[in-house]
Structures are given as C-alpha cells and as structure tokens.
Image: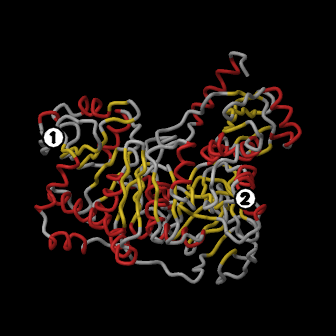
C-alpha cells in the first residue's frame, strides 16, 4: 500500500488533510487529438484488429489501417456536406460500426459529436436539438421496436420531401441542416449513410489535411448531456486532451496490452463506451469486440470465441453473467479473461470476490463522472484483493482531488465525509451555452464540485458514501443511502438495491429500501429486515422494504430517486410497505 506523503509540496496525500496532490507516476500528459491517436495506432499496429462487431445479423471487422482509411473517407464526406469546424453533430443510435467511424471522423475534422441515447423520446430530443444548436442529426430509424423515423416525421414535417438534401432555414430547429440515416430502417427524406460516403470524392486530400491541422488538443471533441435527474440536462463539453489522456492513463494503470481483447456492451452514447472502450483500446493498440446491446449468454459466447481478456460492465451485468447456466455447469472456457473493469455507485465487494473466485479475473474498480472525461480514481492492481474491492482506488496521474465541508468549503481531515472536488486535465471545459451552470460547478481555481459525499483514507483511497442531495437524517444521525445499498447488495438474492428517505413524525426521516431480486430468486420483505438487523447498525436499518421488478431510470441509465421517493410515500399511505 502506498504511504501517505506529507508537506505542502509533496505528492499524494497532503499531511492529515483529505487532499491528494497530483502525481505524474513517471508519465507525462500527451498533447494529441483523437484523430492523431488513430493515425499513430494505424502506423504502429496497422494489421492488428481494432474493432469487431460480431452480431447475429452479421460480422464487421476493421484493422487499425482499415479503420483509419474508413475514417478518412467519412471525414471527407462530412466536409462535403458542410459539416464545419466546431459544428455540433448529434448521433442517435445503438452501438454500431458507423458510430465508431463517426466518433473518429468528427474528431478528425474538428467537429463535435453530441451523444444521444436512442431511447430518447420527443421531449428529450427536442430539448437537445435546440439547446445544443445541432446542425446535423445522424440517427437510426428504429430502436428496440420504437420508430425513431416516425418520431422525426412528427418533429420535422419538412423532412420527408428533402430526399437527403438540406433543410430550409427557420422552423422549430433553425440550426438543423440535415438528417443522416444509420442502419436499415428508413427515415423518409434523410440521407442514407452509404450515400453520404459517396460524397467523399468531393473533398481533396489537401482539404482534409487543412481541416485536420486546425484541430487542437484543447478543442472540444464531444458533448455529453447529463441525465437531468434534477433540472434541465446540461451538455458537458469534453476535450481531445481530456478524453485521450484519461483513456491512456486509466489503461496504463490497469495494465492494458496491445494483445488485449475487450468484450463490452457499454453504450457509445456514454463515456464508458466511447472513451473507456473505444479510446481505451486504441490507446494501447488492443481490440474492442463491441456489442450492440447486452445479453449475458451472448457476451460469454463472445468471450470464448474471441478469447476476450477484458470486460467493461456495470455490477448488474456481472450478476447476470454469473447466473449463466453453462457457466454454473463448468461448460465455459473463460481462461483468457483477466480484467473485470467496473464502475458505479454501488459495487458490492462480494460480487467482485465471486468473480475472482469463479472465473479468476481481477477487478479494476473506478469512480468517475461525465464531467471528468470520465475516470477520476482507479484501484491499484498490486494491492491485496480484499482491500482493493472495498474502495474506488486513488486518483489517476495528474489528477488532484480534495474533500471539503459542503458548508464552509474547508478541506476536511482524513477519514471525514465531505464533498469530492476535482481539478486537472480531465475536467470539462464547461456546460454548452450554460455560463451560470458552469460557474456554479467549477470555481475560479478550476475545482469541479462533484456533489458526491466521499471519504479519503491516509493512503488516498477514495470511497463514495452518497450524494449530498440524497443524504438523509434519521433521529439526528446522518445516513448515507449508498452504504445501506452496498450492504443490501451483499445479500445473495438481491440484484439491485436503492434507498431513499421518507418523512417520519418521530425520527424526521425514515429509511425506505427498494430491492430487485436476482433471476429465479424471491425476496420476503420481513425476512430481509431480519437479515438487515443482523448485518447493519440499528440507525441504518430500513424500516420499509419493497420488492419491485425494476428501478425507474433516466434515458442515460441513472436511477430516478425522485420517482422512488414518490412511490415510497404512496406505498406508505396505502399501507403497502
């Protein structure tokens, strides 16, 4: 374990304060754009596999050389249809080869990819198109049975008559010039992706080179909209420098190799997919086997077929993988799998220990947020397993963090809860067209206020204990829902747990726990309360327990606790909890 370092000029933990001063760990930040990174990988690893989509409906593979060439072609086509420097291009589709090409090609010409969850409905897309000043929308015509094409026909009544051309100025979306279609489902009036590629011949090599030369590492590469659990969603602007270095440093810490094969279903519209997976593998010259969507048995099939060495997933996905019948029967060959990469607010240590015991892969646990490109802290691979699974690691190189009293702003002593704040290359350039929100989140010295309640130990390990807005006070005791959620997730029959506070005449607030059972399991609320009595402090025990089929989530996959609070109050009023 790393020793605490004292003194104002030292690196690591500053004396007895919860303040981690940035370490370089012997590696410098790279001043490089994403387009340059791909060119570099193509030179060094030209014939190595870069991206594989092995779906039931077909297989698509790119070596690094082929990927670089395909990106050049798409970049030229985008220039030909008028996509300018810093133009904002929204991509609304599930994971696909076209998504990866767009991520690289837009970065190469200095445009900005704006990620859109394909599950968005009209109100959500309407807000994003307007607030983000989107000039080009690239969309799939259908997603999981929902007609995006039909929604766009309602939103853009002039689209059907355009035949792939530009929209006239004005209307509800004055910045939106064109719609491009990905995939087989037709969007009437949109330019088909294959026809877009035909436009590449209109752009010379010299024109592409000039556009590429104008792109800088400090430039905005993508905009990721926050989930909007409170207030309007905000578009976090992430730079080439922030995302590329984040992927490089995270991969270096965990020990990624050029021979690695990552199998993952993390969505590209989230930083876990487009940064940690796409850029993370490119950073070392490894191969990403990307899934269009998660399905446990198929992911295990792909791990066997492609000799996968890394999985990036959230805890609920790992739960599903471990429930696979063929895995339980000892019929899976997962001997190549060596790293289980995982992030999230509740990562049960018992789940990580089970992965290690049954499969042999080592857990790599991270704490991140969209505004930080995204990874802030990550576990150290050489630490003892039992210690490693109980925290979110220490900051990446060149990252500074501190934990402050939310009321006073003063740095708190080691071991005391406070708000996590972050500073460094990874912090967002701000929220697009939201100056007040940016100034509220990032102070004049560059510190980003996370809104997370955290604790730092003497060696710099970070542990998230909750959200400031989620903390509840029961009988004068501060209670952090995430601590109770973590404990509930140790129960062998629970796949998901969420805790909220509800008003109580005696204690001010009481604890209400919602749980989702693992497949094939049933949970008795009274029995769970008895289990809680044996495993947690009295003031943390849930007074109310409800078993539900699924937790309500935002389009970006974050739990909507406001809905759970409303549901909890309703269930109490009706005597159902």
Residue at the extreme top:
574
Q: Is residue 196 placed above or below 261 in the rendered structure?
A: above
Q: Residue at x 19, y 73 (%)?
A: 210
**Dot 2 surroundings within 10 Å: few (below 14), some, or many (20 or more)?**
many
Q: Quadrant of the N terminus?
A: bottom right
Q: Residue at x 69, y 30 (%)?
A: 520
Compared across the picture, whether 29 is left or right of 532 comes to left
- Labels 1 & 2 near each other (Cβ < 8 A): no
Q: Nearer the viewer, mark 1 or mark 2?
A: 2
Compared across the picture, whether 33 is left or right of 306 comes to left
Residue 433 in view: no
Residue at the extreme right:
534
Q: Residue at x 57, y 64 (%)?
A: 376
Check residue 511 in the rendering and tell me which mark sits there, or answer none: none
Locate residue 199, reporting x and y percent: 14, 56
Q: Quadrant of the C terminus?
A: top right
Residue marked by disc 1: 170
**Dot 1 surroundings within 10 Å: few (below 14), some, or many (20 or more)?**
few
Corner quadrant of residue 120: top left
Callout 2: SS: loop
Compared across the picture, whether 320 is left or right of 80 comes to right
Residue 175 in view: yes
Locate residue 474, reporting x and y percent: 78, 38
Q: Out of 547 and 85, give the one closest to the viewer.
A: 547
Locate residue 398, reporting x and y percent: 55, 75
Locate residue 493, reporting x and y percent: 74, 36
Q: Is residue 129 placed above or below 397 in the rendered structure?
A: above
Callout 1: SS: loop
Q: Which colour style is shown? A: secondary structure
Corner quadrant of residue 103: bottom left
Q: Is residue 49 placed above or below 178 in the rendered structure?
A: below
Residue marked by disc 2: 389
């Amino acid at each position: 374990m790393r020793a605490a370092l004292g003194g104002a000029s030292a690196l690591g933990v500053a004396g007895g304060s919860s303040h981690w001063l940035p370490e370089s760990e012997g590696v410098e930040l790279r001043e490089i754009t994403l387009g340059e990174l791909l060119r570099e990988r193509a030179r060094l690893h030209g014939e190595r596999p870069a991206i594989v989509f092995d779906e039931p409906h077909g297989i698509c593979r790119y070596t690094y050389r082929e990927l670089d060439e395909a990106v050049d072609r798409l970049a030229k086509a985008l220039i030909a249809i008028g996509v300018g420097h810093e133009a904002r291009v929204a991509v609304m589709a599930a994971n696909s080869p076209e998504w990866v090409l767009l991520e690289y090609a837009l970065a190469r010409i200095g445009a900005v990819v704006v990620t859109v969850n394909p599950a968005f409905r009209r109100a959500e897309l309407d807000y994003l198109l307007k607030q983000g000043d989107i000039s080009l929308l690239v969309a799939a015509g259908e997603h999981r049975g929902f007609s995006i094409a039909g929604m766009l026909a309602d939103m853009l009544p002039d689209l059907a008559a355009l035949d792939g051309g530009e929209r006239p100025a004005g209307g509800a979306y004055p910045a939106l010039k064109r719609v491009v279609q990905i995939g087989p489902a037709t969007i009437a009036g949109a330019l088909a992706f294959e026809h877009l590629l035909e436009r590449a011949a209109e752009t010379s090599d010299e024109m592409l080179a000039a556009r590429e030369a104008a792109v800088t590492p400090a430039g905005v590469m993508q905009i990721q909209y926050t989930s909007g659990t409170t207030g309007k969603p905000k578009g976090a602007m992430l730079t080439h420098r922030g995302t590329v270095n984040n992927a490089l440093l995270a991969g270096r810490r965990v020990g990624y190799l050029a021979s690695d094969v990552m199998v993952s279903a993390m969505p590209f519209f989230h930083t876990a997919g487009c940064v940690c997976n796409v850029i993370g593998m490119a950073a070392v010259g490894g191969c990403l086997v990307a899934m269009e969507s998660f399905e446990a048995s198929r992911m295990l099939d792909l791990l066997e077929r492609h000799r996968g060495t890394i999985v990036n997933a959230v805890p609920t996905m790992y739960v599903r993988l471990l429930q696979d019948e063929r895995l339980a029967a000892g019929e899976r060959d997962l001997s190549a799998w060596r790293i289980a990469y995982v992030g999230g607010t509740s990562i049960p240590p018992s789940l990580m220990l089970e992965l290690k015991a049954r499969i042999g892969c080592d857990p790599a646990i991270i704490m991140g947020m969209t505004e930080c490109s995204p990874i802030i802290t990550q576990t150290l691979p050489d630490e003892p397993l039992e210690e490693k699974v109980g925290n979110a690691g220490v900051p990446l190189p060149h990252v500074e963090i501190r934990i402050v009293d939310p009321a006073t702003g003063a740095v708190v002593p080691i071991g005391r809860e406070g708000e996590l704040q972050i500073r460094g290359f990874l912090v967002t350039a701000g929220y697009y067209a939201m100056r007040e929100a940016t100034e509220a989140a990032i102070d004049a010295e560059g510190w980003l206020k996370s809104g997370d309640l955290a604790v730092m130990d003497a060696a710099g390990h970070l542990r998230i204990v909750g959200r400031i807005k989620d903390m509840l006070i029961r009988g004068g005791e501060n209670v952090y829902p995430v601590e109770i959620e973590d404990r509930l997730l140790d129960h062998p029959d629970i796949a998901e747990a969420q805790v909220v506070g509800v008003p109580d005449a005696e204690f001010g607030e009481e604890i209400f726990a919602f749980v989702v059972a693992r497949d094939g399991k049933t949970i008795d609320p009274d029995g769970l309360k008895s289990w809680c009595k044996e495993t947690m402090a009295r003031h943390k025990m849930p007074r109310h327990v409800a078993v539900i089929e699924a937790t309500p989530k935002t389009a970006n996959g974050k739990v909507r606790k406001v809905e759970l609070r409303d549901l909890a109050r309703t269930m109490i009023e009706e005597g159902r909890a």
